[in-house]
């Protein structure tokens, strides 16, 4: 079965510190991709980063990087130098199927403290 | 920067009424999606749409739901007879295409919060 698991319902981090949000996935597909989205309290879904299953390098976008470990089926998000504005819900998602629908994990609520 | 837009931002309707949620995907995108998020829960896939037809739908997307691309820019989700359990945030998303770097990213609109009373 295709599934995304986020085991951390909540995380706390001090401002300017780095934080890792965990995501594991399960799929039998050879071609797939992993996404991270940020959902602030206002409710919108903001695309952060994408990693394809065949990409050899870990994806990076500014302060966001994706630690992709294919053998372990994990795709953890690393946020470096946390800012107060990073406080939000973070969802890991996987594209599956021929038309790339996304299946989402339950999310991790990140709180950044000054 | 191009973005997906959705209207209205909030819709309140009575049970049994029909609602139409509207989306304008990013202009060069070819693949369109609807997702929903019941309050406090994970985001769930409803339907994908390509080349003017449904390409995939979930078990949630029953006969009460329909999608349409009535012109070159709008993409709509219709719920024929709303139920209390349809109350949720509905997100529209779009992506460029299926293959090639940069084409898989799905960009989401700000959502429509549907409240069924």
Image: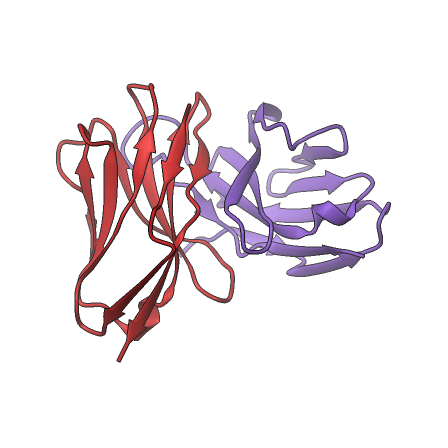
Q: What shade has chain A been given?
A: red
In front of the other: A10 or A40:
A10
Image quarter for residue B53? top right
Q: What shade has chain B been given?
A: purple
| Quadrant including the C terminus of chain A | bottom left
Q: Residue at x 82, y 45 (%)?
A: B18
Residue A29 against residue A107 in the figure, above or below: above
**Is any part of residue A4 visible from this angle?**
yes
Q: Residue at x 22, y 74 (%)?
A: A15
Q: Residue at x 68, y 34 (%)?
A: B68
Residue B44 against residue A12 in the figure, above or below: above
Residue A28 against residue A80 in the figure, above or below: above
Q: Is residue B41 left or right of residue B116?
A: left
Image quarter for residue A80? bottom left
Query: Disc count in the image?
Result: 0
Q: Residue reaching furthest bottom?
A: A114
Q: Residue at x 71, y 33 (%)?
A: B66
**Is any part of residue B28 visible from this angle?**
no
| Quadrant including the N terminus of chain A | top left
């Amino acid at each position: 079965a295709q599934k995304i698991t986020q085991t951390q319902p909540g995380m706390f981090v001090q401002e300017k510190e780095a934080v890792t949000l965990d995501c594991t996935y399960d799929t039998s597909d050879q071609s797939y991709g992993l996404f991270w989205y940020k959902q602030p309290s206002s409710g919108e879904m903001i695309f952060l980063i994408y990693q394809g299953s065949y990409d050899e390098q870990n994806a990076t976008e500014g302060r966001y990087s994706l630690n992709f470990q294919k053998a372990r089926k994990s795709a953890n998000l690393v946020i470096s130098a946390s800012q107060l504005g990073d406080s939000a819900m973070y969802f890991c998602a996987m594209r599956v199927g021929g038309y790339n629908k996304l299946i989402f994990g339950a999310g991790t609520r990140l709180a950044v403290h000054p | 920067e191009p973005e997906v837009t959705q209207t209205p931002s909030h819709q309140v309707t009575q049970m049994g009424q029909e609602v139409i949620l509207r989306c304008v995907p990013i202009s060069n995108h070819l693949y369109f999606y609807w997702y929903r998020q019941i309050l406090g829960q994970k985001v769930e896939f409803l339907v994908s749409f390509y080349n003017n037809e449904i390409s995939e739908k979930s078990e949630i997307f029953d006969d009460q739901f329909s999608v349409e691309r009535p012109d070159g820019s709008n993409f709509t989700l219709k719920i024929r007879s709303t139920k209390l359990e349809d109350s949720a945030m509905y997100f529209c998303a779009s992506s460029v295409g299926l293959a090639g770097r940069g084409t898989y990213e799905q960009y989401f609109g700000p959502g429509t919060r549907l409240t069924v009373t």
